[in-house]
Image (cartoon, helix red, strand yellow):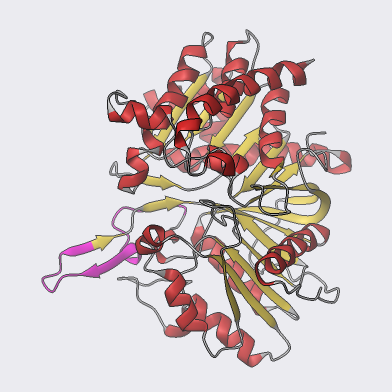
Amino acid sequence: MLLEPGNTCWRRETSARAALIVDMADYFDAAMAAMREAKHTVHLLNWAFEPQTLFHPQPGCTGPEDDRIANFLKRLARDNPGLDVRVLCWQSALPVAATQNWFPLADRKTFAGSNVKFVLDGKLPMGASHHQKAIVIDDAIAFCGGGDIGPDRWDTHHHLDDDPRREMTKHAHGNHEKDFDSRHEVMGIVEGPAAKALGVLFRERWARCTGETPPEPPKTRPAWPAGLKPQFKDIEVGLSRTHGAWKHHPEVREIEALHLGCIAEARRCIYMENQYFTSPLIAAALATRLREPDGPEVVLIGTEHSPSFFDQSTMDRTRVRFIEKLKRADKHGRFQAYSPVTTLGRIIIVHAKLTIVDDRLLRIGSANINNRSMGLDTECDLSFEATGRAATGARAEILRLRTHLLAHWLGCDDAIVETAIREAGGVSAGLEALRNAGYARLRPIELPPVKGVAAVIATYHMGDPFSPADGWRPWRRKIMSQSAERRGREAMKALAS
């Protein structure tokens, strides 16, 4: 079993129903439907929370005022005096807030005088961020994944070119001033004990930030969102966390342990969608498995280049080193790294944080494959593991979801991908066969040369600390990177034995 409480996860629970939600249009629909049915509590954790975000944007990113997330929550709290509505959001650094319409200031102003309890979370190690993304309703239904609340997050699973609903503003002459790029997100939904565990997580975070522990809500029957089909039944769900050591709170590295365990146990294919691929520890673990004659395939999906200049200058350069390491280790032709594009070849931002290991485990969460997500920031992931009575059905569903995600990227039917993988004898070979047949929306990630300043940035992992110990001491990171690589290799040997 991969999900071991106290090691690879914090809690392991069973969810009678669970599902993976692909992209934010469907997530916003499901979240709105679930919150409308709340009886006692609606609790939100977010890295960013922009109050003007529309659930259902219309052309020009317009829409009725009551469709905006902050107004929706205020109305819920006003119309249901017994409903406890809380939002906990990161007290972000000014440069980050500036890129997200100054959401901390806007949030405070928007919720002032309302029945919504709003708090900015700054009780973190220096340089860390509160990165968890979850909505918990009555401790009965909960969402968790990589999606924040912001107008630039919204997109459909079609990732249409020139979708007017992603069009922010226009000049007087009708020329576009700014359009939001296509964006890919995934969220998980669980119910019952698994949702209650996320409720406990929220109350612990709130208590750490404010000193007040919200009361646990009465037991309530889960109100599964209408129109959302459960994909798993009686599935084992693990909750894994990261947070750096802070005051009397010890560090937690469950997400790191889960990734190492999954990589070591993989037999056929490790599939990852992620915003960042920079962790030398994970790179070393994957490289070790790629060197094995009968090891698993490794397929990575990431953005062609980060949308921000800062990330392009830092994380993208370090990703080159990550991918180059895997390419050197790939002696048996089992590694591919792709970036997705729209029908017209435009960038799709991959903000999802998802891992699928064989037909055994599906992980969805907030953690990136970078240093800070493994040991500095606060993170929370959900994992669905195919074990117990429901194992057979869960295994089939995990494989179906992987096929569906690949078909979603290529712009074809699931059956085409399934057939290609079966006939080619592997995921990588199947994808390459489809790309050669004209399904060209997945492109190999380009690797520009890393020289000069870029080499220094990559060597010292600028912007990507390992822990509070090097948060403001980047000169330590070269040695810490070498140590992480060694730990990754040693972990594979230890877990294999």
| Quadrant of the snapshot with the N terminus | top right
Q: Report whether residue 422 is seen.
A: no
Task: Name the image quarter holding residue 255.
Answer: top right
The mark total stands at 0
Report the magenta residues as a range: 157-177
216 w.r.t. 418: above or below: below
**Image location of residue 231, percent across then percent down:** 70, 51
Residue plotted at (47% across, 82% down): 110
Residue most extreme to the right: 389
**Residue 187 percent coordinates (x, y):** 60, 54
Q: Nearer the viewer, residue 149 or 205?
A: 205
- The answer to whether any part of residue 98 appears in the image is yes
Residue name at image x 85 percent, y 77 percent: 218
Task: Compare residues 204 and 333 and report the one nearer the observer.
Answer: 204
- Is 6 left or right of 359, judged from the image as shown? right
User: Which is more toward the observer, 171 or 51?
Assistant: 51
Q: For the C terminus, which image quadrant? A: top right
Asked if residue 98 lies in the magenta stretch, the reply is: no
Horizontal and vertical percent position of residue 477:
50, 31
Residue found at the far left of this picture: 173
Give the x, y percent position of residue 157. 47, 53
Is residue 167 found inside the magenta-colored segment of the image? yes
- The answer to whether 379 appears left or right of 165 in the picture is right
Q: Nearer the viewer, residue 268 or 280?
A: 280
Vertical placement of residue 450 versus 139, above or below: above
Q: Residue at x 56, y 89 (%)?
A: 114
Relative to 140, 64 lies left or right: left
Whether residue 116 sits left or right of residue 257 in the image: it is: left
